[in-house]
Amino acid sequence: MKNETYKQLYTELEKYEHSGVSMRLNNYPASPMQIVTAHMVREETAYMRDYVWDDKGHVREVTFHNILES
């Protein structure tokens, strides 16, 4: 089940990358593989997505922020 989720995430992020959307992980540039790997390694940690849109309503950047659970 989790493997399918990771594959879907990778496919989604790869489409963004091919469209010229920049991606960041904790404020550092990251590739789709780096983001998926971070999700896989830190399963008990959640990531929040932030989307940056251009003036035409297209996604320009996707940023993943590590959310610390207390």
Image: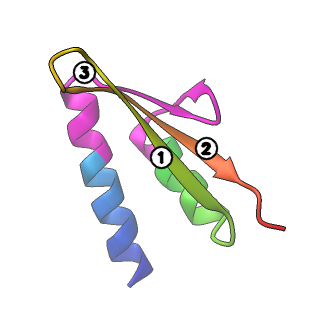
Q: Mark 3 points at which residue?
A: 20
Q: Marks 1/2: CA distance?
A: 6 Å
> Which kind of residue does numbered mark 1 sit on?
Arg
> Which kind of residue does numbered mark 3 sit on?
Gly
Residue 7, given in percent of the width and then of the height, sits at 32, 63
Q: Does the magenta stretch include residue 28?
A: yes
Judging from the image, what secondary structure is the residue with disc 3 in?
A: loop
Q: Name the residue under label 1.
A: 49
Q: Does the magenta stretch include residue 11?
A: no
Judging from the image, what secondary structure is the residue with disc 2 in?
A: strand
Mark 1 nearby-residue class (10 Å; few <14, some 14–19, many ≥20): few
| Mark 1 and mark 2 residues within 8 Å of each other at the beta carbon | yes
Mark 2 nearby-residue class (10 Å; few <14, some 14–19, many ≥20): some
Q: Which quadrant would residue 17 be assigned to in this image? A: top left
Q: Residue 25 carries which label?
A: none
Q: Is residue 8 above or below residue 29?
A: below
Question: Which quadrant would the N terminus be assigned to in this image?
Answer: bottom left
Q: Earlier in the sequence, mark 3 or mark 2?
A: 3
Q: Marks 3/1: CA distance?
A: 17 Å
Q: Earlier in the sequence, mark 1 or mark 2?
A: 1
Q: Which quadrant would residue 61 be assigned to in this image? A: top left
Question: Which quadrant would the C terminus be assigned to in this image?
Answer: bottom right
Q: Residue 65 carries which label?
A: 2
